Image (cartoon, helix red, strand yellow):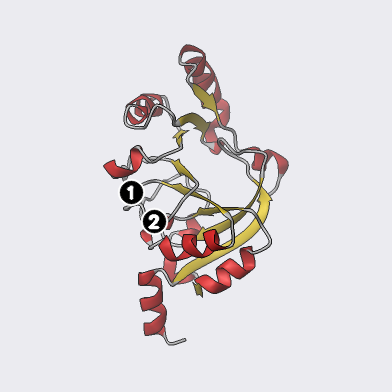
């Protein structure tokens, strides 16, 4: 495939810069503990300083992979989680349409900083202060997951929760590198605000992807 055709295919969603794909136990949020097949798409300009997959940021480092190939790799699994990077940098409709045709459940993890595209059974919105979500995604979110790095992030969580629907599940997740410092803050906050729950990166405790 020529470089020009690759660029066209990626820009239209017929191919995606695939960083990796793997089957594992979901470690975070509402679906933690469940088996899922993860598709990690390259490309992100949000720039979280604590990101643990910075290698995903540069989309050019990851091969443009056709949707057919991506779906073929995922064909033996039921729940598919599309993550990044920031997957909504790319048109998601072609991928989700192909997955849904095979009867798969489609989940996405996104900062919401790009327009929502694709057909999703579950949307995990994880807003970042450096690139706030577009307004349209808040009411579509099934799950709001705020990463807590410092005390101010708790106020940010309150502000973000005001924008989602009443049915949206609310989670606070300690940033891994400062977890010992912020977990007590999260515990106290949730005991005062019981509509929130704790999300822990249990895959890191289990030493799995």
The residue indicated by pointer 2 is 88
User: Which numbered marker is on residue 113?
Assistant: 1
Q: Nearer the viewer, residue 157 or 168?
A: 168
Residue at image location 46% in from the left, 16% down from the top: 193
Binning the other alpha carbons within 10 Å of mark 1 as few (below 14), some (14 to 19) or many (20 upward) gives many
Rendered location of residue 192, percent (x, y): 47, 12
Q: Nearer the viewer, residue 14 or 85?
A: 14
Q: Give SS at disc 1.
A: loop
Rendered location of residue 208, percent (x, y): 69, 48
Can you say whether 75 is above or below 111 in the image? Answer: below
Can you say whether 30 is above or below 72 in the image? Answer: above
Q: Residue furthest right?
A: 206
Q: Give SS at disc 2.
A: helix
Can you say whether 92 is above or below 32 in the image? Answer: below
Rendered location of residue 124, percent (x, y): 47, 42
Binning the other alpha carbons within 10 Å of mark 2 as few (below 14), some (14 to 19) or many (20 upward) gives many
Whether residue 160 is visible: yes
Can you say whether 118 is above or below 65 in the image? Answer: above
Q: Residue furthest top?
A: 192
Residue at image location 71% in from the left, 45% down from the top: 207
**83 on left or right of 135:** right
Is the Cβ of the residue at disc 1 closer than 8 Å to that at disc 2?
Answer: yes
In which quadrant of the rendered view does residue 101 lie? bottom right
Tag count in the figure?
A: 2
Measure the alpha-carbon separation of dots 1 and 2: 8 Å
Label 1 or label 2, whichever comes before in sequence order: 2
Whether residue 58 is visible: no
Residue at image location 56% in from the left, 32% down from the top: 199
């Amino acid at each position: 495939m020529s470089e020009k055709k690759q660029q066209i295919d990626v820009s239209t969603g017929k191919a995606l810069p695939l960083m990796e794909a793997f089957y594992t136990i979901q470690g975070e949020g509402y679906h933690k503990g469940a088996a899922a097949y993860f598709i990690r798409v390259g490309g992100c300009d949000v720039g979280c300083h604590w990101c643990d997959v910075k290698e995903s940021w540069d989309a050019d480092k990851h091969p443009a992979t056709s949707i057919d190939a991506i779906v073929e790799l995922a064909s033996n699994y039921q729940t598919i989680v599309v993550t990044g990077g920031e997957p909504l940098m790319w048109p998601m409709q072609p991928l989700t349409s192909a997955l849904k045709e095979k009867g798969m459940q489609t989940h996405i993890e996104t900062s919401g900083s790009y327009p929502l595209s694709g057909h999703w059974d579950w949307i995990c919105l994880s807003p970042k202060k450096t690139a706030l979500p577009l307004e349209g995604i808040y009411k579509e979110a099934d799950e709001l997951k705020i990463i807590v790095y410092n005390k101010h992030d708790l106020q940010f969580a309150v502000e973000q929760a005001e924008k989602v629907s009443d049915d949206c599940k609310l989670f606070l997740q300690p940033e891994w590198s400062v977890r010992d410092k912020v977990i007590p803050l999260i515990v106290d906050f949730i005991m005062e605000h019981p509509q929130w729950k704790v999300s822990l990166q249990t895959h890191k405790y289990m030493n799995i992807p």
